Each structure stands twice: as structure tokens, then as C-alpha cells.
Image (cartoon, rainbow, N blue to C red):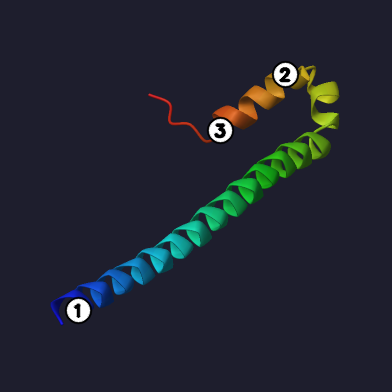
Amino acid sequence: MDILSRASEGSEVEAERNSLSEDLQVAVDDIKALKDELSQSRATAVRDFVDKSAVYPLVAGTSAAVVLQRFFNRGKLVA
């Protein structure tokens, strides 16, 4: 009977391990999807910024590189 209870415990542990493995795979897939979404959002934000401010460098005499540098530095803390 001891052997049967050990076998039963072993199958329960295996089932739990499989369940956790599936949950982990779902979490990994979700993280990858969020990473892709964030990457696309950043690209869209930069593209939108450049599109909306395309006239600004011409009017103000500022190069596009300076405008982009200002855009990326805007979110950083300056000491």
C-alpha cells in the first residue's frame, strides 16, 4: 500500500509540475506580446513626433537631430 500511495503522490506532483509549466509558458508569451506592443508604441510615438514637428526644424533653423535629441531627453531627469 505504501508503494501505491507513493505512486499516487508522484503523479500528483507531475500533474502540478505540468500545470505550473503551462502557466509559466502563458506568462512568457504574455510578456513577449507586451514587449512587442511596447516596441511598436515607441516607434509610433517617435514617428508621430517627427511627423508633427516636421515644420519646426525648418522654421526655427534647428536640425532634425536636435529635435529628436530634445524628444528623447525630455523624459530624463537633469541634475
Q: Secondary structure at mark 3?
A: loop
Residue closest to the eye, 13 or 77: 13
Give the image quarter of residue 3: bottom left
- The residue where tag 3 is placed is 74
- The residue where tag 1 is placed is 5
Mark toward the start of the polypeptide (2 vs 1): 1
Residue at 51%, 53% in the rendered image: 28
In the rendered image, the residue lying farthest to the left is 2
Q: Label 3 near label 1: C-beta < 8 Å?
A: no
Residue at 71%, 39% in the rendered image: 43
Neighbor class of circle 1 (other Cα within 10 Å; few <14, some 14-19, many 20+) is few
Neighbor class of circle 3 (other Cα within 10 Å; few <14, some 14-19, many 20+) is few
Where is 59 relative to 9, above or below?
Answer: above
Going by the image, does 33 lie left or right of 20?
right
Position in image of residue 17 (x %, y %): 36, 64
Numbered label attached to residue 65: 2
Residue closest to the eye, 35 or 14: 14
Residue closest to the eye, 35 or 17: 17
Residue closest to the eye, 46 or 56: 46
Q: Secondary structure at mark 1?
A: helix
Label 2 vs label 1: CA separation? Answer: 70 Å
The amino acid type, in three-letter code, at marker 1 is Ser
